[in-house]
Amino acid sequence: MLLSERKPGKWRQQLNVNRWMQDWQMKFGSFGVQVIVADVAQSFLVVDVAERTVILAPSLKLSAAERMLEKVYMWWKRQNEMPEERLCSLVSC
């Protein structure tokens, strides 16, 4: 679809989502963690600690994704501040 054929509101909304995603990628990037959107079957969010990746389902609503990413970000921030031998999993924190 050409830019001129898009509805103004839809195009603006897509730009906002892209900017929102870039902001989260930059925040997580400071920990060496990648944030991507991909098909994750039945889950809305997958955290692969070993691969340092957060995967969001494309069907996830932006407000829900924001809340989830904030929680995961705070967890990763705590992990980043702890000595390596004291790291914990998401389940045990």
Image (tube, grey):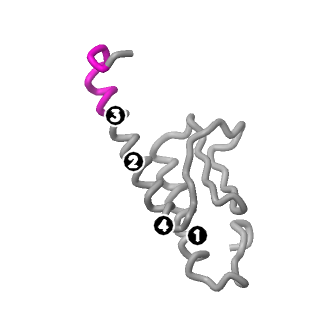
User: What x and y, as percent, mark residue 60?
Assistant: 55, 40
Whole-number angstrom distance, CA of label 1 to CA of label 3: 29 Å
Does residue 25 appear to the left or right of 52 in the view shown? Answer: left
* Residue at 46%, 43% in the rendered image: 62
Residue where numbered disc 2 is placed: 20
Circle 1: is it few (<14), some (14-19), or many (20+) Cα within 10 Å?
A: some
Question: For the image shown, how many numbered marks are present on the structure?
Answer: 4
Q: Earlier in the sequence, mark 1 or mark 2?
A: 2
Does residue 62 appear to the left or right of 92 in the view shown? Answer: left
Residue where numbered disc 3 is placed: 13
State yes or no: discs 1 and 2 in contact (Cβ < 8 Å): no
At mark 3, the secondary structure is: helix
Whole-number angstrom distance, CA of label 1 to CA of label 4: 14 Å
Q: Earlier in the sequence, mark 1 or mark 3?
A: 3
Circle 4: is it few (<14), some (14-19), or many (20+) Cα within 10 Å?
A: few
- Which of discs 1 and 4 lies nearer the camera? The answer is 4
At mark 1, the secondary structure is: helix
User: What x and y, as percent, mark residue 57?
Assistant: 60, 40
Q: Quadrant of residue 11?
A: top left
* Residue at 34%, 16% in the rendered image: 2
Name which residue type carries label 2: Trp
Residue where numbered disc 1 is placed: 75
